[in-house]
Structures are given as structure tokens and as C-alpha cells.
Image (cartoon, rainbow, N blue to C red):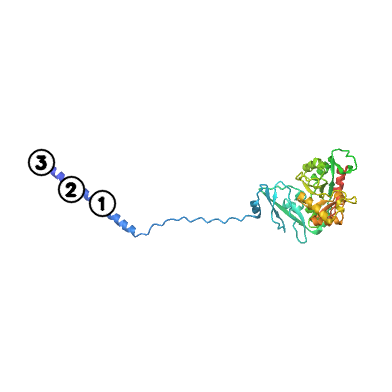
Amino acid sequence: MSSRGSAAPRRRRRRVFAGVAIAVVVVAAVAGTIGAIAMARAGAGAAPAAVSTPTPSPTPTPTPLTPEEQLLATATDPAACAVSFTGDGVTDAPQLQTQGGLYAGLPIPARDGLVFAGWYATPADAAALSIPGRVNGSEPVVCVDRRVTLYGAWMSPEQNAAENARIPILMYHQFTTKPEGESGWLRGNYAYIGDFDAHMNHIATGGFYLPTWDELSAFIDGRLFLPNHSVIVTDDDADQSWFDLAVPVVDKYKVLSTSFMITAYRQDPAPSLYVLRRSHTHDMHQAGDNGKGRMVNWTADQIAADMEASAAVLGVKEVMAYPYGHYNDTAKEGLRQAGWEMARTIEPGYVTIGTDKLALPVQRVNYGMGLDALVGMIG
């Protein structure tokens, strides 16, 4: 009896505990539901969360191209080089030149009361008027990153006149490998190639300045300074011996020279970077009616027509050499009509400020004139 009596209270305690647990769960569930409803109501009245919109980066304004960069941007030649010019009073725009080719058409600036003294590789060269540092069309273009800058210099007209420059134009004809020379009436025309080699070596290593023809023209006008230590090398007729013997020497020493070609008979391309082709007329290197050259027998119109034919072959005018050295006022007029500015004679002398551009004198080189003879002519 006692055992059943004790079991009944334990069952009641389990029921009480079970009821309490269920009540706790119900209360918690109700509380959670109420909390969720409250949060939902609170959220319904709140503003929506802000959405972050990225700000676009501003497009940078491109840096304008420099004049040099503009030139290079239009160039299709990978060897193109932008040449800039600077110096007191220099306003010339940059030019495109070809790296490895000779400079072409460099500007000759002008300023009131001053004479242009040339372009130089460095400011120090320009200040010193250093001949080794002076740059012109006798030198190949050398660039760094497709650019190079040339520095201009100036002097007074009085300084230019004080130089008293006398520019020799050397005139060669044919060449021979025989130290004893050639025979016949043209013997004097044939320079021994050993002498020519010594001449070009002296010019190349002696610090001489090699003016271009446009520079010589500006010098004659008093607009450009040329040093006394200047020389121009020319050859008449473009004989085969010039191509075979002399041009390799010109190449070896890199001396700018001019070949005066009779274009009715020879139309060879320039045989060297350092050889300029200029006219010895098209077909006037023949005797006319009076035994002298056609150039002093023909009319100005006939001369002009012949010279235009020569220019069509060479692609340039600028300077020519009179056949046989024969010329007169009619010849000069014919040249003017055809657009030629300068002409070289066979008359001895030196080019100075004010020389007649259509009667340039020369220093003739004959057979037997060795190095001492050349030094006597040009220093």
C-alpha cells in the first residue's frame, strides 16, 4: 500500500514540470512573434537604405603635341628626324630631315643690323663660332630619339667684314692613275689621283668649312658669315674617271663636292651621298657658229630652254658651270629667265662679299699640282 501512495505524487510533479515547460515555450513563441511584428512595423515606416553610385573619373585633357611631335606624327619615314632651331632671335619652325642623309634646306635667318653666323651642334659651339661644331648641308643628320636641336649665332656686319673671307672654288676635270700624267693636249686637265687623295685628306683633316651653294649666295649678299677657312670642291663634265677614281676618294674623306654634268650625255644618279649633281648645261657644251660655245651663240630664250631641260633631269637649279667658261650678258639673261641664281666661270679668283653671282671665279687644279700647290690656294 505504501508503494502506490508514494508513486502518485511523482506523477503529479512530472505533469507540473511538463506544464511549466510548455508554458515557457508558448510564452517565448508569442514573445518572438510580437517582436517580429514590431520590427516589421518599425521597418515599414523607415526610409529605404541608400545605394552607393560610383562617381565617374574625369577624362584628362590631352597634352597638346609640340611642333616637333606634330611633324613626327605626320611622318611615314622611320628615318624622319625633327630638327629644332633655337637661339637669340631665332623663330624658325622645326623641319623634318632624314637621318643619315645630308642636311637639306636649313634656314638662314635674318635680323636687322646683324649677320647670321651659322648653326651649331651646342650652345658652346655657337658662342665660340667653332668651325668643327658648325652644322650645314655638308654633314649627315644624326638624331637621338628622332630629334636634334641646332643653335644659331649672330655677329655684326663689322665683324663679318673684318673676316675678309675669300672663298675658293676648286675646279677639277679628269683624273688619272699615272703619276707621270696623260699625254695629249688635255694633259693639264688630268689630276693625278694620288694628288687628289692628298688634297681631300688635307681638306677633311684641316678643319675646313664646306659651304653649300645657298650659303655661298647668302654670304655674297652679306647675310651669312663664312670663315676664311672655307672651300668648295667641284668637278666639270662628270667624266668616267670622276666616277671611277675620284668619287671613292670623296667618299673616303666625306668631303662635299659638286659634279657639273652635261645632262644630254650623262644622267647618272648621284654616285655618293657627298656628291651634288648640278648643271653644265643640257646640250650647250658644243662649239657654236663662231667657234665658241653655244652659250655665247644662242639667244636668251634658247639658253633658257636648254637649262630647263637640264633642270628636268637633275631636279635642281641653283648653280651651273659655263661650258668652256664662255659666257656673256645674253647667257646671263638666259639663266635668269630659267631661274638660275649662280654660275661658275673658269676665271681665276676667290668669291667675296658682293661677287657677281653669275660670274663666280675659280681656282683651277691642273696636273702636277700637289699638296703644296693646294695649300698655296686655300691655306
Residue at image position (84%, 40%) is 193
Q: Which mark is residue 190?
A: none
Residue highlighted by disc 2: 16
> What's the amino acid at mark 2?
Val
Residue sitting nearer the eye, 71 or 314 = 314
Image x and y of residue 64, in percent: 61, 56
For the residues labelled 3 and 1, the Cα–Cα distance comes to: 42 Å
Residue at image position (29%, 56%) is 37
Residue highlighted by disc 3: 2
> What's the amino acid at mark 3?
Ser
Which-is-in-front pick, marks 2 and 3? 2
Judge whether residue 355 can be spotted in this image.
no
Q: Can you say which quadrant of the picture contains the N terminus? A: top left
For the residues labelled 2 and 3, the Cα–Cα distance comes to: 23 Å
Q: Which mark is residue 29?
A: 1
> What's the amino acid at mark 1?
Ala
Which-is-in-front pick, marks 3 and 1? 1
256 to 110, vertically: above or below? above
Q: Are marks 3 and 1 in contact (CB under 8 Å)?
A: no
Of the numbered discs 2 and 1, the one sitting upstream in the chain is: 2
For the residues labelled 2 and 1, the Cα–Cα distance comes to: 20 Å
For label 1, the SS is helix
